[in-house]
Amino acid sequence: MLARLARAATRRPLTVILLWTLFLLLGFGLGTGVFGRLSDEVPNVPGTESQRAAAYLRHADPDGDTVVGVIEGARVGDPALRGQVERAVAEVRAVGGIAAVPDPYTTRGLVAADGRALLIPVTLKGGLDDAAEERAVDAAAERIRRIDAPEVHVSGGPLLGTQIGERAQRDVRNAELISLPVVLALLLVVFGGLRAAGLPLLVAVSGIAGAFLALFGFSQVTGISVYAIQVTTMLGLGLAVDYALLMLVRFREERRHNPDVTEAVHRTVAAAGRTVLFSGLTVAVSLTGLLVFPSTFLRSMGLAVAAVVVVDMLAALTLLPALLVRFGGRIAPAKERPAGEEGRPFARLARFAARRRVAVLAVVVPVLLVLALPVTGMRIAIGDARQLPSHTEARQLYDTVDAHFPPGTGVSPVLAVLRPGTDPATAGRIRALSPGAQSRTLPDGTEVVRLRPSGRVDGASATALVERVRELRGTQPVQVTGTAARLADFRAMLADRAPWAALTVLAGIFVLLFAFTGSVLVPLRTIATTLLSLGAALGVVVWVFQDGHLAGLLGAEGLGALSLTAPPLIVAIAFGLAMDYELFILARMREARQLTGDDREAVADGLRRSGRVVTCAALLLAVVFAAFMTGGFSPILQIGLGLTLAVLIDATVVRMLLVPATMTLLGRYAWWAPAPLRRLHDRFGLREAPDRPEGASAPAHSAFMR
């Protein structure tokens, strides 16, 4: 299969390059339209009580979303400023699509007790289409911002999603401007030439175009989260560089022994292409775990990121070979080195870990477990504007309200929807749960009770209030919705589906690794060591962003919980990325073992020949992730740090120490499989025969080889 793919890509390289050029134009043209279609509605889970109640209110409630303006000045009661505010309120009320704008000077709670700030809530009419809502929001926000005051900020409702989407677009652009030059500089160091260094960047640009195009396509049928842009772009860029690096290193090695460029490309695709293929498949399979969750956000992220991985894989297996056929003759072959010199430090490390395998396991495993300990206390939350950088408008509005108004001001209420037929006594007990509860009756007779929780919108008191309403209602026709209710339902969904997601991913990874190695024990060992590195990385993220240790160094603060987007994405993506480096190393170990039959020496030789690639790939991927952490958006900081640590821990401690130690401990049994499975792999497993040096003897332990 790979041989046919290589021949197809190299027979008509200009056609392949032209097709990919058209794809790039489509991605950066049509695909960038996704920035106008982003949503911040992350915690919605179709079919849950909170989602059903919210859908009912959107249909039955004559009022829609609310955006809020905040005015801060020396004295908001100043007659001149008051006149401006009153004129602005009157003009906003006249905007089409606006349902209500209260007078902040006569409405209780809208003027701060210190007289230095006031709020202007603007309620939209319900049932507006997207265009009408956007016109109303833009007109209202533009008029409020014209008020002449020291500080004027407008955000909330649909405006918040727009602001975050614009912020995401700037962050992606800045991250690309930072990461691409740094990646190019590192590639120049690795390859020592501009041509070889530039080719991975061309593949990386294809990955970015694929990210935009995949997201735009999915946005036509489902909501796309604001987080999707950074996550898919960083992964698309990083994996493209990884795959291209692996292919180029192998190409330069093949060129050292084969002057014919086209033949060297074919051999590269047959060998390294196999690893890229399985690596892409393992990352994609890791992301299928997200499809088990009914959350629209998690499913769309899983599909979009998997699509980007497939684009990167195809670019490495088609575009890069075509480019190599056209320009590979100008790329210098790898330098000939004395036997045993290439990768000597990695071979020494492997032999050290092999000799001291018990000591390595006794030290490394407990250290990783200690780093993973904070995961046991991990909490997730929707988060508030503190997740945003301090200079964003939504964050400035939050800080102004927090500084001048009582705690809980502006916190989204818990909404109890009491349908006709609800027992009056039950309704009374629900209203009594929150002092100052407000009620209103919809045209169909449904009563909506707004319960104000103390503390944050996703704090313990808010979610406890949701549970209390659900306890009190009994069998009454009462539903609960609002931000806190959606969080409670999202947490319940994660707890219910997480075991099935884990089972799906582990089973898929096991099957792929078995197809790659023909072994039963190697996949089990790989999964165990990967879980160790993943747990350690996630534990550090909890320690930093939940508990607040060293968060200031990253421009963040301890929030008491992780963003609900971070843990599932870190786990799914990092697990797949860890497979990259495992496959890079296993491919070389397997080749060495097939040539020599020496299990122990194959471990050292595999690490000797792959260690440099794995280290460079991890460093380049870490650079990409770190560049996306410069935006200051806390969920992306959490995902970026988690993935960076997972990659670095896995590519160093795990792959350089645990892998040789455990492989040596298992010995020849590492490649064992029961006879029926061995026959199955012989028949269906994807593999290539290694080149045997002249005079090399047949490998020993053939019963354990596949």
Image (cartoon, rainbow, N blue to C red):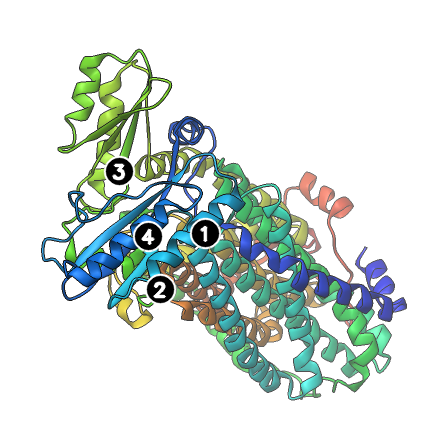
- Determine whether 132 is above or below 329 in the image: above
- Residue 505 visible to an observer of this rendering: no
Which residue does the image show at 54% across and 59% down from the upper left?
Answer: 577
- Which amino acid does the dot numbered 3 rest on? Pro
Q: Nearer the viewer, mark 4 or mark 1?
A: 4
Residue under label 2: 392
Residue under label 1: 571
- Which amino acid does the dot numbered 4 rest on? Leu
Residue 457 percent across, percent down from the top left: 26, 44
Mark closest to the chain's N terminus, 2 or 1: 2
Which residue does the image show at 61% across and 47% down from the upper left?
Answer: 218
Label 1: how many residues lie within 10 Å, few (<14), some (14-19) or many (20+)?
Answer: many
Numbered disc 2: secondary structure: loop
- Disc number for residue 413: 3
Image quadrant of residue 419?
top left
Mark closest to the chain's N terminus, 2 or 4: 2
Mark closest to the chain's N terminus, 3 or 4: 3
Label 4: how many residues lie within 10 Å, few (<14), some (14-19) or many (20+)?
Answer: many
- Disc number for residue 687: none
Q: Nearer the viewer, mark 1 or mark 3?
A: 3
In whole angstroms, how far apart are the C-alphas of marks 1 and 3? Answer: 32 Å
Which residue does the image show at 23% across and 27% down from the upper left?
Answer: 439
Q: Is residue 224 left or right of residue 91?
A: right
User: Is label 2 in contact with label 4 (beta carbons under 8 Å)?
Assistant: no
In whole angstroms, how far apart are the C-alphas of marks 2 and 1? Answer: 29 Å
In whole angstroms, how far apart are the C-alphas of marks 3 and 4? Answer: 21 Å
Mark closest to the chain's N terminus, 2 or 3: 2
Residue under label 4: 562
- Determine whether 151 is above or below 187 in the image: above
- Which amino acid does the dot numbered 2 rest on? Thr
Mark closest to the chain's N terminus, 4 or 1: 4
